[in-house]
Amino acid sequence: QVQLVEFGGGLVQAGGSLRLSCAASGIIFRIYDMGWYRQAPGKQRELVAVITSGGTTNYVDSVKGRFTISRDNDKNTVYLQMNSLKPDDIAVYYCKAERWYLQRREYWGQGTQVTVSS
């Protein structure tokens, strides 16, 4: 059974910081591309940040310079460090694992709520 378990969501003041974690099990973590997505109320789900199995990162323009995605293959965990949070960042954040080797597969976490107060 594949599981992606997310931690770290919650309520934070505008300008504050939060770190999300996503721990994966049931997969060979190191060969998976990992990403963070978010869905704000009434909005489509969007890619926030991705880190490939090779370590390449990419970010949506709105979070560049504020968010950092990283991974620890020894812990089977991907992180999203979020700094200078704004009300525009309010959303449910989802972790995704995707592989391209062998058969293509993708798995999603359950989501964690991030709320920013001003």
Image (cartoon, helix red, strand yellow):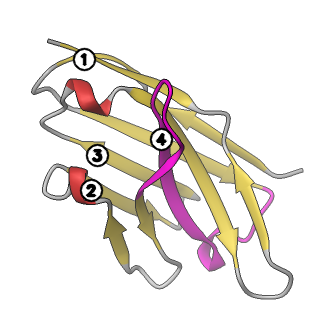
Q: Amino acid at mark 1?
A: Val
Q: Is residue 59 above or below residue 99?
A: above
Report, in whole angstroms, how far the alpha carbon at label 4 lies from the one at label 3. 14 Å
Q: Residue at x 44, y 70 (%)?
A: 51
Report, in whole angstroms, how far the alpha carbon at label 3 lies from the one at label 1. 13 Å
Q: Which mark is residue 12?
A: 1
Q: Position of residue 34 (x, y in %)?
A: 54, 64
Q: Position of residue 7 (x, y in %)?
A: 50, 31
The mark nearer the N terminus, 2 or 3, is 2
Q: Are marks 4 and 1 in contact (CB under 8 Å)?
A: no
Q: Amino acid at mark 2?
A: Thr
Q: Which mark is residue 81?
A: 3
Q: Are marks 1 and 2 in contact (CB under 8 Å)?
A: no
Camera-side residue: 19 or 107? 107
Q: Residue at x 23, y 24 (%)?
A: 87
Q: Which span is picked out in magenta?
A: 26-48
Q: Residues within 10 Å of mark 3 (few under 14, many from 20)?
A: some
The mark nearer the N terminus, 4 or 1, is 1
- The mark lying in front, picked from 4 and 1, is 4
Is residue 37 within the magenta segment?
Answer: yes
Q: Which residue is mark 4?
A: 38
Q: Residue at x 16, y 49 (%)?
A: 66
Q: Are marks 2 and 3 in contact (CB under 8 Å)?
A: yes
Q: Is residue 80 left or right of residue 44?
A: left
Q: Which residue is mark 2?
A: 68
The mark nearer the N terminus, 4 or 3, is 4
- The mark lying in front, picked from 4 and 3, is 4
Q: Is residue 74 left or right of residue 90?
A: right
Q: Residue at x 72, y 71 (%)?
A: 28
Q: Amino acid at mark 4?
A: Arg
